[in-house]
Image (cartoon, rainbow, N blue to C red):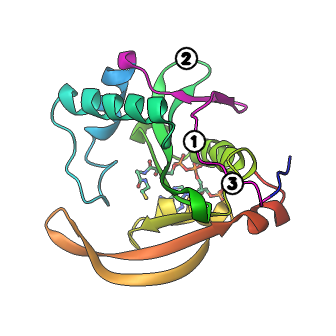
């Protein structure tokens, strides 16, 4: 589905999207325990400039922040639910929205028990399709640690291109860490046939 790029969108609702194995949906207060399990795992935040969560209050704060985004329609923040079990296994966000420039950033994480099963490709595909075709974004950016091979592989699989390199951009668990800047344009996405 294609929308005219000339029509700007300024409200960014978080809908329910379904894929073969996943449901992407707004977070809810009942997700706190599952969300805590994801982000309290040091492996998940290995390449982030943030420590693993140490209290369920961190999850409750993240959910409160997401609920505020839903009220204001300011950012898209999906919980990723495994359709077979109904359990929340991660998140994918379209955030740092610049409506006038039709641009935002992409962020994602899955519980480590669910890595390597193609879930990131499935979830990001649905979120990006929504971003480009319903929200009429023109460009999505991602910023990742060069050592994060899984994240690079996912982005390149989705059609993102390497656009830049910024040395020592983040302080990550006691050391400075570089950034690779990735970008995906709507026309690249459409040329490759979407997800
Ligand atoms: C990055 C992350 C979401 C990938 O999730 P995933 O569900 O395991 O990814 P998928 O199974 O969909 O794999 C996607 C591609 O990456 C490749 N891949 C996955 N893990 C990899 C690894 N460790 N090294 C190299 N390639 C890897 C897969 O082979 C696949 O490529 P293919 O489709 O061409 O075969 C997951 O590792 C994660 O949550 N990491 C911690 C959070 C994080 O780093 N988020 C990004 C921060 S910007």
Instruction: Determine contact: label 2, label 3, CB under 8 Å.
Output: no
Q: Main secondary structure of the magenta part?
A: loop
Determine whether the residue tagged by mark 2 lies in a helix, strand or loop. loop
Residue toward you, 105 or 23: 105
Q: Residues within 10 Å of mark 1 (few under 14, many from 20)?
A: many
- Residue occupying image coordinates x 59% and y 70%: 183
Q: Which residues are magenta?
A: 5-30
Whether label 1 lies within 8 Å of ligand 1 gets the answer no
User: Which residue lies under the disc numbered 3?
Assistant: 8
Q: Is residue 165 left or right of residue 99?
A: left
Magenta segment includes 19: yes
Pick whichever, 102 or 23, lies toward us: 102
Distance from disc 1 to disc 3, alpha carbons, whole Å, reads: 11 Å
The label number, if any, that marks residue 85 in the structure image: 2
Image x and y of residue 149, in percent: 47, 66
Name the residue tied to disc 1: 12
Q: Secondary structure at mark 1?
A: loop
Q: Earlier in the sequence, mark 2 or mark 1?
A: 1
Residue shown at the point (27%, 26%) measured from the top left:
60
């Amino acid at each position: 589905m294609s929308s005219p790029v000339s029509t700007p969108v300024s409200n960014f609702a978080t809908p329910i999207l379904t894929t073969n194995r996943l449901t992407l949906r707004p977070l809810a207060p009942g997700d706190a325990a599952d969300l805590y399990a994801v982000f309290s795992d040091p492996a998940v935040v290995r390449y982030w400039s943030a420590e693993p969560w140490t209290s369920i209050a961190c999850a409750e704060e993240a959910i409160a922040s997401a609920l505020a985004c839903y009220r204001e329609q300011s950012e898209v923040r999906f919980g990723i639910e495994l359709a077979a079990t109904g359990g929340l296994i991660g998140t994918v966000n379209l955030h740092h929205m610049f409506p006038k420039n039709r641009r935002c950033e992409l962020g994602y994480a899955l519980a480590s028990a669910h890595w390597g099963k193609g879930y990131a490709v499935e979830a990001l595909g649905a979120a990006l399709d929504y971003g480009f075709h319903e929200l009429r974004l023109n460009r999505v950016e991602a910023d990742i640690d060069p050592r994060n091979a899984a994240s690079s592989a996912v982005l390149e699989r989705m059609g993102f291109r390497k656009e830049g390199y910024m040395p020592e951009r983040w302080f990550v668990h006691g050391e400075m860490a570089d950034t690779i800047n990735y970008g995906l344009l709507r026309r690249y996405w459409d040329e490759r046939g979407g997800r």
